[in-house]
């Protein structure tokens, strides 16, 4: 965590993170616009943020897009804030954000985390029901071949649809699939009202991609990219979901036990 605190100590780097929070997925040129900093300085600050895993990058053609990565911040929260009254802390933080900050207009989430495991073991954790049910509360039925159907099971609800399929399947390297179908049974299970269910069901189906890369001698870099309908509300509903899930996945693979369920609901 030392690298995270060091990166956050500089006001210029915090300003870059604020700009990514306001609009995620920016190029270096876009981040430089309107800043009283030389392009070289911005590049150096971004390198520090990337080294601390606070920023992750994704290539899109010839462009490199920069995304705010929430995983290290979530790890800090899990280490300290969870010892106190998380409910009141979260409520106050949400109120402060609502009053002071503009809403994010980016509808793509990108998270990066490093896990002491192997690509093979991480692939198992992403695809085998015995793993996913432990850290996520979700199990999947699929042969994980490209184009194959994907059945999603959560809290007693079973969700399948012709458009709920595997998009990319490169074992131990890359996995992508369309997000699950919002059925009546699922909505009742998780406590979502019919008006909200109907609204998110009408959105363009979102997709999630897992990129797996060996890192060093005993770690794997996992990057999760979730792309949403830019005009929908699902993006906001999922905004708190991925970091706790990834934290629980990391904990399970590194210690043999996931985080307690109440730390990664949603």
Image (spheres, rainbow, N blue to C red):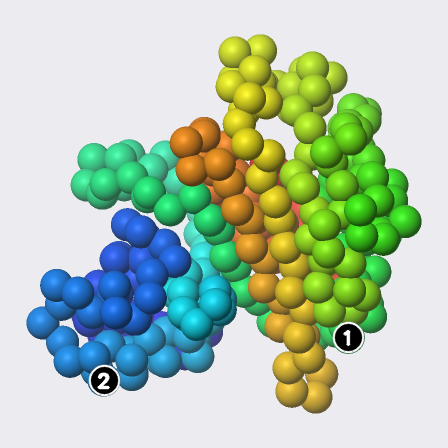
User: How would you rate the neighbour count of disc 1 (Cα within 10 Å): few for under 14, some for 14-19, many for 20 or more?
Assistant: many
SS under mark 2: helix
45 over 151 or under it: above or below: below
Kindly identify the residue that appears in the image at 33 percent across and 43 percent down.
105
Secondary-structure class at tag 1:
loop
Q: Name the residue under label 1.
A: 118
Frontmost residue, 124 versus 66? 66
Q: Nearer the viewer, residue 205 or 37?
A: 205
Looking at the figure, which quarter contains the C terminus?
A: top right
Q: Count the numbered circles shown.
A: 2
Kindly check if marks 2 and 1 are in contact, taking CB atoms under 8 A apart as contact: no
Name the residue beneath numbered marker 2: 40
Residue 190 visible here: yes
- Location of residue 221 in the rendering, given as x and y in whole percent from the top left corner: 62, 72
| Residue 82, visible in the rendered structure | no
Query: Which residue of the protein is positioned furthest toward the right in this rendering?
Result: 143
Question: Left or right: where does residue 176 sit relative to residue 93?
Answer: right
Mark 2 vs mark 1: in front:
2
Instruction: Give the x, y percent position of residue 248.
Output: 66, 54
Residue extending farthest to the bottom is 217
Earlier residue among tags 2 and 1: 2
Residue pictured at 29% horizontal, 39% vertical:
103
Q: Where is residue 23 in the image (x, y as percent from the top left)?
A: 31, 51
Left or right position of 211 against 65: right
Instruction: Name the residue nearer the viewer: 128 or 259.
Output: 128
């Amino acid at each position: 965590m030392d690298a995270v605190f060091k990166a956050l100590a500089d006001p210029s780097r915090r300003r870059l993170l604020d700009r990514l929070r306001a609009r995620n997925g920016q190029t270096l040129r876009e981040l430089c616009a309107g800043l009283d900093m030389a392009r070289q300085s911005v590049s150096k600050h971004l390198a520090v943020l990337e080294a601390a895993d606070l920023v992750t990058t994704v290539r899109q053609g010839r462009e490199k897009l920069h995304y705010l990565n929430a995983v290290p911040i979530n790890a800090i929260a899990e280490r300290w804030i969870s010892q106190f009254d998380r409910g009141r802390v979260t409520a106050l933080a949400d109120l402060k954000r609502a009053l002071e900050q503009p809403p994010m207009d980016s509808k793509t989430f990108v998270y990066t985390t490093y896990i002491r495991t192997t690509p093979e073991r991480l692939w198992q954790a992403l695809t085998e029901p015995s793993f996913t049910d432990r850290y996520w509360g979700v199990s999947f039925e699929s042969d994980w071949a490209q184009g194959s159907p994907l059945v999603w099971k959560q809290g007693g609800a079973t969700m399948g649809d012709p458009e709920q399929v595997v998009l990319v399947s490169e074992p131990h390297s890359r996995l992508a699939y369309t997000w699950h179908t919002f059925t009546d049974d699922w909505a009742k299970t998780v406590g979502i009202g019919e008006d909200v269910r109907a609204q998110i069901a009408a959105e363009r189906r979102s997709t999630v991609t897992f990129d797996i890369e060996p890192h060093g001698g005993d770690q794997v870099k996992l990057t999760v990219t979730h792309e949403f309908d830019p005009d929908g509300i699902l993006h906001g509903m999922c905004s708190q979901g991925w970091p706790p899930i990834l934290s629980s996945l990391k904990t399970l693979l590194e210690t043999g036990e996931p985080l307690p369920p109440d730390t990664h609901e949603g």
